[in-house]
Image (cartoon, helix red, strand yellow):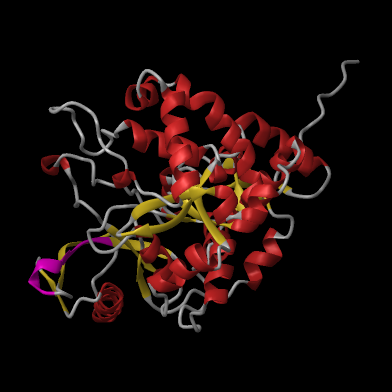
């Protein structure tokens, strides 16, 4: 008699709404935003998020300020500056992009430093910018910082010939060298002046963290996957690998399978809000109890940074929120569907619309905050209550950016 095939166990089904609540809770969007904003509270918030992405676009204010103010109403940029530049409890480096990261995790960036050291100069893009003799440029930059202390890109002469493209990514060799030495851990960001980086030796900026030994390979994988899952609640293998961009997809899959086999995490199947098929994933072991214990969302509308953690993975945002978001700053104007720097609108636990803001600083020191466009999602009715809550959110944004007035132009 032929043996019956062994049936694989049925995975618990997680509704999209539950996965969404776990993500919102893990990323600080179910907490009371009116709690007092102190350096300690801000640090705890960033550690809970994992990191906050830093971005240079300043249409309204920098993305990291928007991300933090959305969760902490009393947030002011000076609080973040204090943690980064005075207390050094945060440091600046890369995850999937530039970010402010708790310094306690600095040793887990040492494997990343080594990857950069091995791979960066194999890339034609870098070689084109640093020139034919990269080592001499690195040595010159390093020696000057050792001798003179913290330096900026502008402290190095641009010796390239006239006519060289110097905009955007047209870095001069010394800028490329500074970035290389920073990305490989020799330098650190001591502070920023008008958002421009000031570089110094990592051993002077972060002496204890710089001296700490790197983690073992398995310790690093376990840290990357476990901390990512804690900050997502539920995650597929690619979401685990993509959170820090510290380990490969293969390593994330291997870790998930082994941790689930040990009973440390739970295998689940997550349903989708957008009608796509459910996806296999892993969840924190107490996902049901954790979701049930989460508080209700604050009764307000909030305007999210385009780089908010819940938007970072656009595919996940579509699956869990049925919200299709595209950042259009780099899309040619005539092809934009909404606008240059559109902020999604979060109402409770739903993404219900988007608006396109612009701060007109030239109208005075503080200026006018213009809402150039407003779009509600299909099926979302523009009721008086919803409109009032949106206006309150715009008022909070205006206070954050120092605008004395705001107006809706459409």
Which quadrant would the N terminus be assigned to in this image? top right
355 falls in the magenta region:
yes
Looking at the picture, how far across and down is residue 350, in whole percent? Answer: 41, 64
Q: Residue at x 35, y 22 (%)?
A: 131
Question: Compared with residue 122, is residue 137 higher up or lower down, i.e. above or below?
Answer: below
Q: Residue at x 41, y 63 (%)?
A: 67
Q: Is residue 42 left or right of residue 386?
A: right
Which residue occupies the foreground of this view, 66 or 18? 66
Which quadrant of the view contains residue 302?
A: bottom left
Which quadrant of the view contains residue 295?
A: bottom right
Residue farthest right in this picture: 1
Q: Is residue 338 left or right of residue 389?
A: left
Decide whether the magenta segment is chiefly helix, strand or loop. strand
Q: Is residue 219 left or right of residue 274?
A: right
Which residue occupies the foreground of this view, 108 or 252? 108
Q: How many marks?
A: 0
Residue farthest front in this picture: 147
Question: Compared with residue 344, is residue 44 higher up or lower down, i.e. above or below?
Answer: below
Looking at the picture, how far across and down is residue 161, in whole percent? Answer: 18, 26
Question: Compared with residue 171, is residue 64 higher up or lower down, i.e. above or below?
Answer: below
Q: Residue at x 37, y 18 (%)?
A: 132
Looking at the picture, how far across and down is residue 315, in whole percent? Answer: 43, 43
Which residue occupies the foreground of this view, 161 or 262? 161
Q: Is residue 387 left or right of residue 267?
A: left
Where are the magenta residues, as a range?
354-364
26 falls in the magenta region:
no
Could you tell me if residue 326 is visible in this image? Answer: no
Could you tell me if residue 49 is visible in this image? Answer: yes
Question: Compared with residue 350, is residue 205 higher up or lower down, i.e. above or below?
Answer: above
Which quadrant would the C terminus be assigned to in this image? bottom left
Q: Residue at x 19, y 52 (%)?
A: 339
């Amino acid at each position: 008699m032929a043996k019956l095939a062994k049936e694989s166990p049925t995975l618990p089904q997680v509704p999209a709404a539950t996965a969404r609540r776990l993500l919102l809770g893990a990323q600080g969007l179910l907490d009371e935003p009116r709690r007092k904003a102190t350096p300690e509270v801000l640090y705890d918030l960033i550690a809970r998020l994992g990191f906050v992405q830093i971005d240079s676009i300043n249409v309204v204010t920098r993305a990291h300020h928007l991300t933090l103010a959305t969760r902490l109403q009393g947030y002011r940029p000076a609080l973040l500056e204090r943690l980064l530049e005075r207390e050094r409890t945060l440091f600046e480096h890369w995850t999937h992009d530039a970010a402010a990261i708790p310094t306690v995790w600095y040793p887990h960036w040492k494997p990343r430093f080594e990857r950069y050291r091995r791979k960066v100069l194999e890339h034609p893009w870098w070689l084109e910018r640093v020139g034919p003799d990269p080592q001499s440029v690195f040595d010159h930059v390093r020696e000057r910082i050792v001798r003179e202390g913290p330096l900026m890109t502008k402290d190095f002469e641009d010796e390239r010939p006239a006519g060289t493209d110097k905009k955007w990514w047209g870095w001069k060799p010394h800028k490329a060298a500074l970035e290389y030495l920073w990305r490989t851990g020799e330098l650190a960001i001591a502070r920023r002046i008008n958002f421009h980086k000031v570089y110094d030796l990592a051993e002077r900026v972060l002496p204890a963290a710089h001296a700490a030994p790197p983690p073992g390979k398995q310790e690093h994988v376990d840290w990357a996957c476990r901390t990512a899952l804690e900050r997502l609640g539920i995650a597929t293998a690619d979401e685990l690998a993509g959170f820090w961009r510290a380990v490969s997809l293969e390593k994330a899959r291997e870790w998930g399978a082994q941790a689930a086999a040990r009973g440390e995490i739970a295998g689940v199947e997550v349903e989708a809000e957008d009608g796509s098929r459910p996806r296999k994933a892993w969840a924190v072991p107490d996902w049901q109890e954790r979701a049930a214990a989460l508080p209700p969302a604050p009764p307000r509308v909030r305007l999210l940074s385009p780089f908010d953690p819940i938007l970072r993975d656009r595919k996940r945002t579509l699956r869990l929120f049925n919200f299709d978001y595209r950042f259009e700053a780099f899309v040619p104007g005539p092809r934009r569907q909404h606008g240059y720097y559109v902020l999604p609108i979060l109402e409770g636990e739903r993404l219900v619309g988007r608006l396109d803001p612009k701060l007109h600083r030239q109208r005075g020191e503080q200026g006018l905050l213009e809402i150039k466009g407003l779009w509600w999602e299909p099926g979302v009715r523009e009721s008086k209550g919803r409109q009032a809550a949106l206006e309150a959110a715009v008022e909070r944004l205006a206070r954050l950016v120092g605008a004395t007035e705001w107006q809706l132009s459409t």
